[in-house]
Image (cartoon, rainbow, N blue to C red):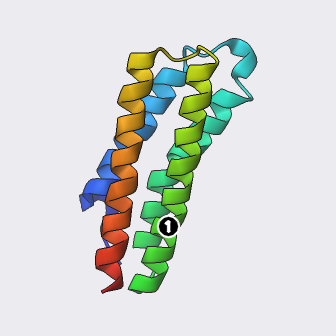
Amino acid sequence: MRNYFNLDVWQAAHAFALAIYQTTRSFPDNERFGLSSQARRAATSIPANIAEGAGRHGNPEFVRFLHIAAGSASETEYYLLLARDLAYLDDASYRTLNEQVVRIKKMLVTLARKSRK
C-alpha cells in the first residue's frame, strides 16, 4: 500500500478538485444538479481514484486506477470547455483550470508508466 498523501499527483488533483468546487459556486442556480454537479463529481473522482488505487495491492491495480483517474480528468476537461462556451467561465479562469487538469493528466501518465516497470 502506498501513502497517497505523499504523491505529487494526488496533491495536485486534490487542489484542482477544491478549485472546481470554488469555481462552480458561481455557476447559475439552474446548473446545481447539472453542469456544477457533473464537474464536481468528475474532478473529485481524480484524487479519489488515485487514493483507491494506492490502497490496492500491487502495481497493476494501482495503474488501473491511475487510468481511471485520467479518464475522469479528461471528463472534467470537457466540462470546463462547456462551461466556458456557455459563458459560465471567463477565458482566464478556463485557461488556468485547463492548464491544471492537463498537468494532472501528464502526471498520471508518467506515474502509470513508472509504476508498470
Quadrant of the rendered image containing residue 94: top left
User: What x and y, as percent, mark residue 86?
Assistant: 64, 18
Residue in front for this viewpoint, 106 or 39: 106
Across and down, in percent, residue 71 comes to 55, 57
What residue appears at the point 63 percent right and 28 percent down from the top-left corner? Answer: 36
Q: Could you tell whether 41 is left or right of 69 in the image?
A: right
Decide: is 99 above or below 86.
Answer: below
At 52% across and 41% down in the image, what residue appears? 77
Q: In x, y percent, where is residue 33?
A: 74, 28
- Please rate how many residues cluster around mark 1, counting C-alpha atoms within 10 Å: few if below 14, some from 14 to 19, many from 20: many
Q: Nearer the viewer, residue 64 or 53?
A: 64
Quarter of the image holding residue 35?
Answer: top right
Q: How many marks?
A: 1
Q: Type of residue at label 1?
A: His
Q: Quadrant of the N terminus?
A: bottom left
Q: As displayed, is residue 58 above or below residue 105?
A: below
Quarter occupied by the C terminus:
bottom left
Callout 1 secondary element: helix
Q: Is residue 69 left or right of residue 37?
A: left
Q: Which residue is mark 1?
A: 67
Please report the residue visible at 34 percent of the width from the left and 75 percent of the height from the top: 113
Q: Position of residue 45 (x, y in %)?
A: 54, 51
Task: Name the residue at 60% across, 16% down.
Answer: 27
Q: Is residue 53 above or below residue 48?
A: below
Front one among 82 and 50? 82
